[in-house]
Image: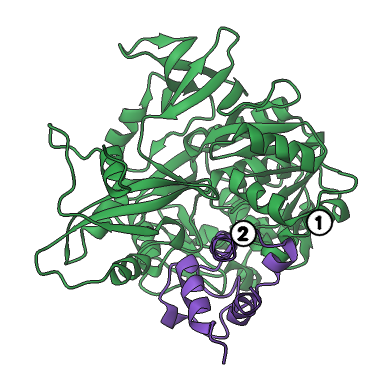
Amino acid sequence: MNVTQGRLGTIVDLIRDQRWSGDELAREANTRAGFLQRFVTSDSNRFVIAHGNSLQFFADLLAVWQAGACAVCVNPQLTAAELANVTSFVEACAVLVDDAAPTSGLSAPVLCTWRETSKGVESGIPASSLDDPALILFTSGTTGTPKGVVHSHRSLASRVALNHAHIGIDVMSRSLCVLPTHFGHGLIGNCLTPLLAGRDVFLFHNAGMQRYAHLAEVLQENDITFMSSVPTFWKLVLRLAEAPSQTPLRRIHIGSAPLSAELWQDVIAWSGTSEVVNAYGITETANWVGGASAEQLEPEAGLVGTPWGGEFAVLADDGHVDSHGEGEVIIRSPSLMSGYYLQPELTDQVLNNGWYRTGDVGILDAQGVLRISGRNRFCINRAGITIYPEGLDLLLERHPDVLEACAFGIPDELSNEIIGIAVHLRDNADVSDRELIDWTRERIRAEAAPERLFRVTEIPKTDRGKINRDTVARHCLGEDS
Amino acid sequence: MSDHRDEALAVLAAALQVDPGSLDDTSAPGQTPGWDSLAHMRLVTALEERFERPLEPLEIVSIGGIEDVVRLLDVA
């Protein structure tokens, strides 16, 4: 991806009060690219970017692409052990940090590019092709075998182009990002889509309660026309912030977690625009792949609407692909991932003949409108962040006092779900619940750590010896009959 | 010293999912690990259950440390 060929928008960090014009951002990226090219080897061109939500992050990301390399964007809150695990797994050629990132025990050189630019030279023409890996985002397993979603330059460019076509460019002329940039929703949808169209992006992630309480002023002072977020964000804002007296917002996306019809209507009332969209997207599809606007359809829980490029279908129980009906939702789109990094078997489980199996269950009507009715996977959705419970099971089972563990989601009004975990301890184990939770938090980022722990004398199994997480959850929550 | 300090520590520790012993007078939103917006709202929910009334927006955003939680408990 050659960042000097397009026109980038201005990027503004509202938290640190910094801004770069598109030209400044492109110049910074180009200079860094020349420096980064020195670290690319014949074995690896993968740069882990271990910081985010800043001007420096976007300069590093675009520099990696300008250098013809692949960016591995990770959560800046990863523990040192998690970062070391990811760095080793992708065999990174370097890790890009800001001042705050942990830097010990990594298997690659650690670089702070903004301090190194004096050593840089302008880069040449990128050496990558459209189908080379451009971006890896991890959705789970940073403590064990990481699950890294690989996108090529082609899939990313397709997603951005389709977003432009289906959303419109002018409506995103000034976009507010309250989401983290290691998150496909925040990075690809909220930031890259406008930025690569020459539109301006305003970073406002983790701004704190005081600033969220004044969201209306932030929107008006910066003339924000577009923003995207998760339902939990709006649950906070609607409690804290007065509605804007005159809204500059022309469109709002809400996604990454189930949106109730009530919250949808409340956001319309608060924001003063009916162009509020329940956006459907998954990291594997480069995020937004469809959506329903309240301008066209009456808000209802689970309403996804029509695809933005590509097509939706449902997989019937007999394996037949149907253009309408009920079943597992499958998606065909030019923005589908290439696969999971170094995990071909896992890739084969979800990608088949160009279709991606979402794991969501839905109803597709004859007009092509999709409604999600449930999930057939046990992933936990905590405030829009997907947590795969299998990784938590394996982590807890590394504790010397734990024989077996089983994580599951617990419904929560604020977060959609919180994380519970059942543990079967060894005989004579002498460990408190607090010690177990603290042990976990030392090894995994806070957003994935369990919040409630249940001691059980056994983990219930099916008659085929498999864990049924619903059964375990009901047992722990006292809901089994 | 307020009688409510231990209770404040316990409520805050539960919201942040940390040991009460790890909190002190310098603990603050955005600075103490885990005290993000979600944890803050968890704290608010716990206080609302304790008070059996919803907190006002100004009360919610004015919680900047343990002393503020103690103050809310003192006047409840």
Q: Are marks 1 and 2 on the same chain?
A: yes
Chain A tint as drawn: green
Label number found at residue A218: 1
Kind of residue indicated by mark 1: Val
Q: Is residue A49 above or below residue A333?
A: below
Identify which residue, A403 or A475, lies in the foreground. Answer: A475
Q: Label 2 is found on which chain of the structure?
A: A
Identify which residue, A100 or A470, lies in the foreground. Answer: A470
Residue at (59%, 36%) from the top-left corner?
A259
Query: Which chain, by letter, is purple?
Result: B
- Which type of secondary structure does the marked residue at label 1 adopt? helix
Q: For the view shown, which residue lies furthest in the top direction?
A: A366
| Label whose residue precedes the other's in the sequence (1 or 2) | 2
Image side of residue A230 versus residue A7, left or right? left
Give the labeled residue for mark 2.
Answer: A57
Q: Which quarter of the figure is the C terminus of chain A placed in? A: top left
Residue at (72%, 39%) from the top-left corner?
A266
Q: Label 1 is found on which chain of the structure?
A: A
Check if mark 1's residue and mark 2's residue have beta carbons within 8 Å: no
Residue at (47%, 69%) from the top-left corner?
A110
